Amino acid sequence: MKTPHIYLVAGEASGDVIGTRLIKALRKKVPNCIISGIGGHLMAEQGLQSLFPLQELSIMGIMEVLPHIPRILKRLNETEQDILLKKPDIIVTIDAKGFSFRLAKRLKKYGFPLVHYTAPSVWAWRPKRAQQIARFLDHLLVLFPFEPPYFEKVGLPTTFVGHPLTEEKFDTFKSDVLRKKFSLKKEEKLICLLPGSRTREVSSLLPVFIKSLQQLNQKIKNFRLIIPTFPHFETYIRQEMEKTNLKFSLITDEQGKYQAMIASDAAIAASGTVALELGLTQTPFLIAYKVNSLTAFILKRLIRIPYACMVNILLNKPLVGEFLQKNCRPDLISNHLYEILQKENNQALRQELSTMRTLLTNKNKQPSKLAAETILKILKKYQES
């Protein structure tokens, strides 16, 4: 097989993490493989020169995306032209399904093998979407064990690879060592604050989280905040936090984020992949989220599952508190956070979360390794046909 040229498209912060691990796994198999495409700062550390900043595709919500359509269409055209110019051997899109699937539909006519990594949530809403994407994708790599049947029954070859987050060696981080690193006193509580990975999320959720913690401060005096975030949000978050009397520290690196989670007594997080990270680090947490009211109205009539948090979905019970839309209120969040900080509740939650790794693991191989092998097999088959 000639030196493969693999074009990756990641359009979310979570996709940047998955893409980074995939690049490493591909290069272990084929050290001289060519990687190009779109990614974030983590993929850039692996040598990817992104066509444009990943953040431009990190938009969530039905109504929220409307003002950005002209820019997204421009980026879609640019990506299509870049692929036609570079003529890669295979295209792998990761997350950002709105952008990824529009791109795949455009590229289908050119004969490129098209693989998507992470499945749309057809089990939660829009079940007919499985049949639609089977028309333009050649293969789907999925993170959760219950997903393949939804796509295989409509003729889309699907591989359960497991979640790449399970590759993290969380057990090498010791909470007591980390607490010393963060200069915490023995009786001091540490709360991890995770207000999102998108600009709109951070700007809408951070004020709610701050008010929640100020209310908590009336019940528990001795706590500190640790805020893992991305470098481009650091200045804004610091400015907002400095307006308060809350003690806080900011972290902008991936390993630091996991260390912060493990050292923390509890966390408040925006809904998303971060819930799985908190579950795997066994950090008691709650999620809070709100979208445009019209988006919420539409989604409420489409969604067929009782939970928003992936931990609750996997465990099939409301273990993690969900404070969504009208319930995304400082008083409710503050009260629930106080409850999960209580020793007995805290220990019980950690015990329940200890099952998460098993639920997200493919017993055969590491997820990124299996994903890389599957992609290279598809490429080989395509080249031989």
Image (cartoon, helix red, strand yellow):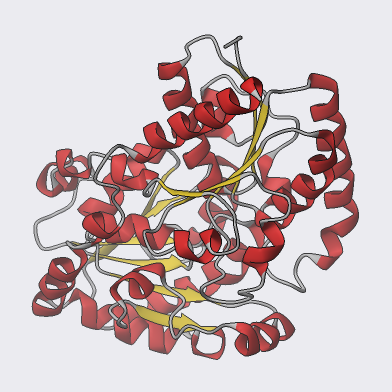
139 or 350: nearer the eye? Answer: 139
Q: In this view, does 201 lie above or below 73?
A: below
Residue 25 shows in this picture: yes
Number of callouts in the render? 0
Residue 275 locus on image (x, y percent): 39, 63
224 or 95: nearer the eye? Answer: 95
95 or 171: nearer the eye? Answer: 95
**Quarter holding residue 112:** top right
Residue 225 shows in this picture: no
**Quarter holding residue 213:** bottom left
Residue 84 locus on image (x, y percent): 84, 27
Q: In this view, does 194 lie to the left or right of 378?
A: left
Q: Is residue 96 left or right of residue 219?
A: right
Residue 355 locus on image (x, y percent): 19, 63
Give the residue furthest to the front.
Answer: 385
**Quarter holding residue 146:** bottom left
Quarter occupied by the C terminus: top right
336 or 46: nearer the eye? Answer: 46
Residue sitting at x 79%, y 42%: 108
Q: In this view, does 30 lie to the left or right of 62?
A: left
Q: Is residue 191 above or below residue 14?
A: below
Residue sitting at x 81%, y 36%: 79
Residue sitting at x 45%, y 37%: 371
Quarter occupied by the N terminus: top right
Residue 296 locus on image (x, y percent): 65, 84
Q: In this view, does 238 lie above or below 149?
A: above
